[in-house]
Image (spheres, grey):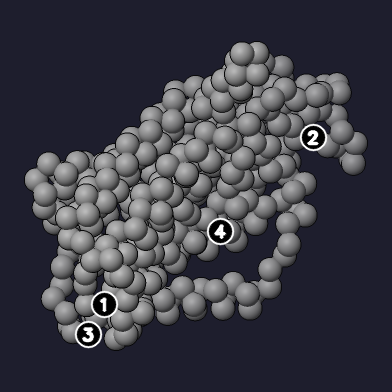
Amino acid sequence: MLHWNTGWSDLTGDLVVPRVARPSTLQRFAAPERTTAFWIGLAVLVLAAELGALYPVLAGSQPVVASDLVYRLVGGSFAACGLIAWHRRPDSHGGVLMLATGIAFLLYPLLTQINAPPAATVAMFISDIWIFAFLPLVLTNLSGGRLQSRVDWMLIAAFALPLLVLQLVWMLLLEQEDNVIGFFPDAGAADAVDKAQRALCAVAAVATAAVLAIRWRAATRPLRRAMLPSIAGAFALLMFTSLLVNDLITGERSETLLWIALASLITVPAAFLFGLLRSRLARHGLAELLLGMRTLRGEQLQRALSRAIGDQSLQVAYGPVTPAPGRATAPVEHDGRVVATLVYDAALDDDPELVEAVGAAS
């Protein structure tokens, strides 16, 4: 009983605040440096994959269905924003996860263009594989893409059962021309497995959205700003839940709900780009801070720095500081000597340029 109580307490902690070490500024500078050729090559690969996925639509070789077009554009938007995020924060795994989500979206339309049953079978099996990059992306937005919380692993496992295990079972039972592994055709059993998959995915999506909502409620103001892509992801998951519930109730796939659910996914990279824009505007606002810096002292100086960095909990310390959990520090130097330390919310490490600019201004 003692071990059970301890485990439950730890699990509750993981639910509210994932116990994952945030990447530090030192990790940012220690991250492997990629060459310009690497980024150009990766960008060309992403562009080629997006154009290849859009080819049937652009060439007019198939009817233009809104959901198909959005599906392909979602992949491109995630891949492009993933490249930007990875280049901007090489110490974080978030950019890689966003890029992987986009590539996973593009794999299905690319494979379906190969006129071969094995390719169609693989495409059918991996049609929803994007969720296994998307989930870590939205769940670890506050921890640099590092997935260690047991709650997060449980949520991923909840999707793995219907989308990997039951997907394979469904394909073994499905009698379809391009399905080369339909060894045990049984329409009734395949339909039952399909309904079980949809029900389990709906429950897992609601659970994931609930976890993200709990974390947002418990977060500080800077953390909430950093969580905008996660909240957008929670909204998208709820839209997919409405689609799955409609499937179960009506027995038919709603093209309108599918279009809305897919379009809602674009809010995740859009939230990321909004964060980048806000960061740039904040850095431009430092000019006003610099103009009045020399006349400020004590509480007035601290309030000005708080406004500039967007953290009302910021403190200016003039002695040795050991930051509490969830806090980070930045030294303020004068003539090569540390004269003070800024103590701020660790969520601002997601915008290291802003922190460094405020520290330099100080």
- The disc at residue 178 is 1
- The disc at residue 59 is 3
- The disc at residue 57 is none
Q: Are marks 4 and 2 in contact (CB under 8 Å)?
A: no
Task: Choose mark 2 or mark 1, whichever is in front.
Answer: 1
Judging from the image, what secondary structure is the residue with disc 2 in?
Answer: strand
Judging from the image, what secondary structure is the residue with disc 3 in?
Answer: loop
List x then y, in percent, for residue 203. 32, 36
List x then y, in percent, for residue 53. 33, 75
Where 5 sits versus 67, above or below? above
Task: Choose mark 2 or mark 3, whichever is in front.
Answer: 3
Residue occupying image coordinates x 72% and y 37%: 359
Where 283 sits versus 172, above or below? above
| Measured Cα–Cα span from mark 1 to mark 3 | 24 Å
Q: Are marks 2 and 1 in contact (CB under 8 Å)?
A: no
Answer left or right for 96 relative to 259.
Answer: right
Label 2: how many Cα within 10 Å (few below 14, some 14–19, many 20+): some
Residue occupying image coordinates x 73% and y 57%: 31
- The disc at residue 96 is 4
Where 107 sits versus 146, above or below? below
Task: Choose mark 1 or mark 3, whichever is in front.
Answer: 1
Report the front residue among 107 and 5.
Answer: 5
The N terminus: image quadrant: top right
| Measured Cα–Cα span from mark 4 to mark 2 | 30 Å
Answer left or right for 190 relative to 118.
Answer: left
Task: Choose mark 4 or mark 1, whichever is in front.
Answer: 1
List x then y, in percent, for residue 100. 49, 61
Asked if residue 38 can be seen in this view, the reply is: yes
